Image (cartoon, rainbow, N blue to C red):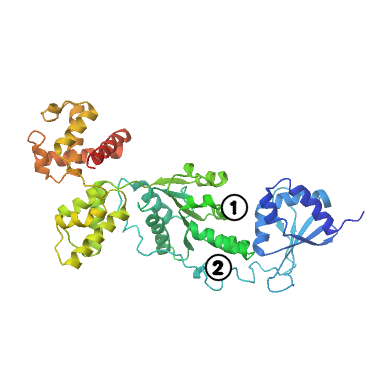
Amino acid sequence: MEKNAETVWNNCLSIIKDIVEWQHFKTWFEPIKPVGLKESVLIIQVPSQFFYEYLEEHYINLLAKTLKRELGKEAQLEYRIMVDGGNNYNKPLTVDVPGQGYKSFANNEVDFPLVINTPVKNPFVIPGLKKMQIDPQLNANYTFDALIEGDCNRVARRAGKTVAEKPGASSFNPLVIYGSVGLGKTHLAQAIGNEVKRVQPNKVVLYVSSEKFINQFIDHSRNGAINDFIHFYQMIDVLIIDDIQFFHKAEKSQDAFFSIFNHLHQSGKQLVLTSDKPPKDLEGVQDRLLSRFRWGLSADIQVPSYETRIEILERKMKNDGLDMPPDVVKYIAFNINNNIRELEGALISLLAQSSLNRKEIDLELAKKVLRNFIKSASKEITIDTIQKMVCDFYEVPYDKLLQKTRKRDIVQARQISMYLAKAFTKNSLKNIGEHFGGRDHTTVIHSCQTVKDLMDTDSSFRENVMELQQKVQLAAL
């Protein structure tokens, strides 16, 4: 019986559909139409240039094996790519089906255009697809200079700097930044994008929330333009997607993102993702995506320390040309300890009330204005309270803390007590020193610096101090 194009292709499909996932089969093989057979050359019609490129990248070996079974070792595949504007075809591209895992193009006799003639629709509504016209969707205020570095974000911030200097070329690909709401994930992610655009303006950078990505995918699905959607995103050099935890409710969008992720990563492009939890704890996200998220670096951002919160407020005041008494700054930093967004919101509310009521900012006004930000009236934390808390934690006699002894466990407890007293009380360095057996302010400074240095180098010590900080904060509620 003489073979025809349809019979050969149907026989190939009967093998292929048992090998690839059903959804991938529906997406990438069902739209293909066999249009001709010339001896050992099967001619197939594909919807777009992107469709052809995707088949070549992901399924060429599978096509080769199945076609050789039907047409023998001389089998060849010829593509015809549809032009959206009519029923004509581009001139065919003939592809020799590889036998050893490689492909060669026999197109030296034809003038095949390597760029789609019909522009791909840009989801960000910029007419005509030109790379440099893609709006990166970045907030210019989100820069590294505006992002205070502290223990809470040091690893993530420095990893972001590395990525911005060498997008796609470091081992931090993808870079997954995770942490609770309002801690600066979006700021850091966009700072990476802004830095890339500053240093390498020809790079195509795009920031998009996961919800916008999902909505765009749904719109393109309704219009039968999923391939255009995927193709657009595969042209990005640095893709930043915010809040990937929302992918859990969009299975088909995850399929599209999987294709985009693979293409960008294999092409040496950079991916930056943010989430409210680490990849291992993301629910409803495909395992194959989660495994790829772990290819690079996952860096967390934590709640900023009291000192970092003060630095954030001071930077904000400096940038806005504002002035505020130190005791008010300390009051805000001490009481607003959930996230940076609330911290800045409290500052703005205080300034607004001061301006509207024509009152100078003082501690009394701060307490009045910030009642809505502070969940409950805070108790005054005393040095004595902190000393007893540290003594209980380290099982050190309280009276020993005040004596002049060089025993290591007592010296360390004393230094931590001074560090916490400086962070959580409004006492001067001199007053703090007097509460520790009449020591002077230089001893307090030295103790605080020693604690900071040990926290940077000793993870066990750092965990103990952070646990004590939490105990002090709870005692204030």
Asked if 379 appears above or below 169 in the picture, the reply is above
Horizontal relation, residue 137 to residue 338: left or right:
right
Which residue is at a point 23% across and 64% down the rendered structure image?
352
Q: Quadrant of residue 48?
A: bottom right
Q: Which residue type carries mark 2?
A: Asn
Circle 2: element type: loop
Q: Which residue type carries mark 1?
A: Asp
Q: Quadrant of residue 83?
A: bottom right
Residue at the disc numbered 2: 122
Residue at the disc numbered 1: 255
Q: Work out whether residue 412 can be spotted.
A: no
The spot of residue 404 in percent (x, y) is 10, 29
Q: Nearer the viewer, residue 199 or 288?
A: 288
Q: Nearer the viewer, residue 340 or 289?
A: 340
The spot of residue 157 in percent (x, y) is 36, 51
Q: Nearer the viewer, residue 271 or 221?
A: 221
| Quadrant (top left, top right, bottom left, bottom right) of the C terminus | top left
Real-space Cα separation, disc 1 to disc 2, in angstroms: 19 Å
